[in-house]
Amino acid sequence: MKLTIKNIQGADAGELNLSFQPVEADKGNQAVHDVVVAYMAAQRSGTACTKTMGDVAGSGKKPWRQKGTGRARAGSFASPLWRGGGVVHGPKPRDFSKKVTKKTRQLALRKALTERLNAGEITIVDDIKLDSPKTKGFVRILNSLEVEGSTLLVTDNSNENLILASRNVESVELANPASLNTYQLLRCKNVLFTRAAMEALDQRLKTEESEKSE
């Protein structure tokens, strides 16, 4: 798969050949769904907790005698019917995470990358170098590339000025090719790769494919 590389002025600056195996149009949809659902489920803290009758602080004494008062029978101050009492069938801490196999995660990432490349929604820049960590310089580059809206910028961690300059732009999310996942690749309107980052991701996908075939 050949991709056009641009410079920071938005002009063509060469081509890049990707060697990872693209996913066919009728494959991988279920894998993407499973991986995204699992990722979003894993973000849930699962810490909601309510008190049952046994957890509510208070006396175990019967509020009043069983008969003769004219009032309804009551056996506990912690009754769910009373204000401040226990909660019936309320939430308790739980783990929402879902298991997804390694092969499914790999297929989902390749499928997401294939679809976004085919749709022309990924821009590859030769390199993004900033002399200083100033946000206005980074915004100027985005304008030159005609990138508007939510943007995923995939680059390595060595570009410190870029990391500092981009973190003040609310619509921009940074990612690393070694840890890039399917959800990140799909959620933003624009995806911007540096050449080095795309080559690193391509090598990662090739390695995963070779391990799978062994």
Image: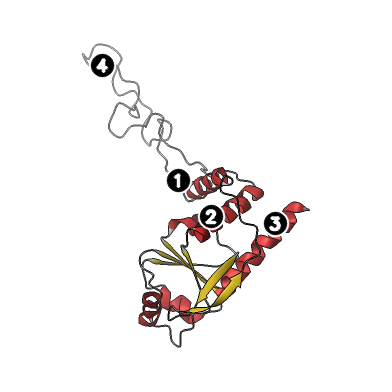
Task: Please provide percent x and percent y for residue 159.
Answer: 52, 79
Q: Amino acid at mark 4?
A: Ala
Q: Earlier in the sequence, mark 4 or mark 2?
A: 4
Q: Amino acid at mark 3?
A: Glu
Q: Earlier in the sequence, mark 4 or mark 1?
A: 1
For the view shown, which residue lies furthest in the right direction?
Answer: 214
The answer to whether the residue labelled 3 contacts the one labelled 1, judged by CB atoms less than 8 Å apart, is no
Which label sits in the foreground, 4 or 2? 2
Seen in the picture, residue 108 relative to 151 is either above or below; the reply is above
Which label sits in the foreground, 1 or 2? 2
Cα–Cα gap, marks 3 and 2: 16 Å
25 sits left or right of 85 in the view: right
Q: Earlier in the sequence, mark 3 or mark 2?
A: 2
Identify which residue is drawn at 60% across, 44% down. Answer: 99
Residue on which the image places disc 4:
72
Identify which residue is drawn at 55% across, 43% down. Answer: 30
Viewer-nearest residue: 213 or 114: 114
Q: Amino acid at mark 2?
A: Ala
Q: Amino acid at mark 1?
A: Thr
Residue on which the image places disc 3:
209
User: Which corner quadrant of the image does residue 158 belong to?
Assistant: bottom right
Q: Tell me the element at label 2.
A: helix
Task: Please provide percent x and percent y for residue 173.
Answer: 44, 66
Q: Residues within 10 Å of mark 4 (few under 14, many from 20)?
A: few
213 sits left or right of 108 in the view: right
Task: Please provide percent x and percent y for residue 90.
Answer: 40, 33
Residue on which the image places disc 2:
112
Cα–Cα gap, marks 4 and 2: 63 Å
Q: Tell me the element at label 4.
A: loop
Cα–Cα gap, marks 1 and 2: 32 Å
Seen in the picture, residue 131 relative to 187 is either above or below; the reply is below
Residue on which the image places disc 1:
47
